[in-house]
Image (cartoon, rainbow, N blue to C red):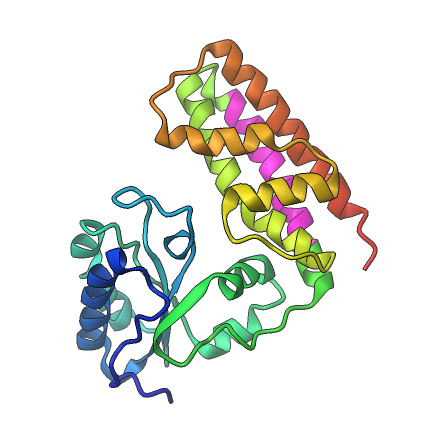
Amino acid sequence: MADTRSAPRWDWVREIIREPLRLLVERLQAALGDNLQSVTVVGSSLTDDFQPGVSDINTVAVLGEHDVATLNAVASLVRPMSRRNLSPPLLMTPSYIDRSRDVFGVEFLDFQLTHATILGADPFASLSMQKTGVRLQCERELKAMLVRLRQGYIAGGGNKRIVRDLLISTAKGLAPVARAMLWLKDIERPRTMGAALRKAAGEFHVDLDRVIAAERRRYEKHRPTDAEIEGTFALVLRAVDLLATTVDGFEL
């Protein structure tokens, strides 16, 4: 078992997020004791995508075992964590990680690319994923995304705010899939969202400019017209469809 009594390591974590993470680690150690094996920071808080005060700080806590008492202990930390933009940690066990590589390859590849283990042993550095499973997950994610886009548009009944939010969530969800598609072709994966989408656009010959623009909208005060929203939606829908067709045809 990893020794989580040693001091947390902050070398790869930007200064602005260290204090909330210190609080998280201290409270997890107090609540979970020896059941806590490691804490790893993942995602945008480690990249240039991070927006102080806006972006969430995401972590993975590896435990020896799961039980309801553990869930209750972590649930009691939700309110103080949310005030500091800390998302509740994803709780995993070593066995869960090992046995989930075939179904969560896209997510684990993203964790592996952008992570910093601040306490305990690194749970992601040595993971290996099979390309067949990752390709299948990419195809499934993209085709499910198409269903959500179409059904969300219908359910929104023309409400441009609903469609705008749908486009933003699609852009966020597309970046990990785009990086996984690049990995499938042994192409270097950029860590930031915009760079990853631009790289995928060039490699797979699909226009993702509107996807990138849609993600930026959550930080802008610009209010697009109904025609702009509808035009963006049509282009994003086409882009996701083209990526789904592309990954479906991958020969590995």
Q: Which residue is drawn at 22% across and 65% down?
A: 24
Total marks in image: 0
Picture residue at 81% right of the left edge, 47% below the top: 249
Residue 180, given in percent of the width and then of the height, sits at: 63, 54
Q: Please state if 47 lies on the left or on the right of 18 as rendered.
A: right
Q: In this view, does 99 lie above or below 220?
A: below
Q: What secondary structure is the stretch in magenta mostly built from?
A: helix
Identify the residue at horizontal 77%, vertical 46% (top origin). 248
Residue interval drawn in magenta: 136-154
Q: Position of residue 124 (x, y in %)?
A: 50, 72
Q: Is residue 139 magenta?
A: yes
Snapshot quadrant of residue 137: bottom right
Residue depicted at 61% across the width and 46% down the height: 141
Left/right of residue 56 with respect to residue 33 in the rendered view: right
Query: Which sits in the foreground, 231 or 98?
Result: 231
- Quarter of the picture holding the N terminus: bottom left
Counting from the top left corner in percent of width and height, residue 150 is at 58, 27
Residue 168 colored in magenta in the image: no
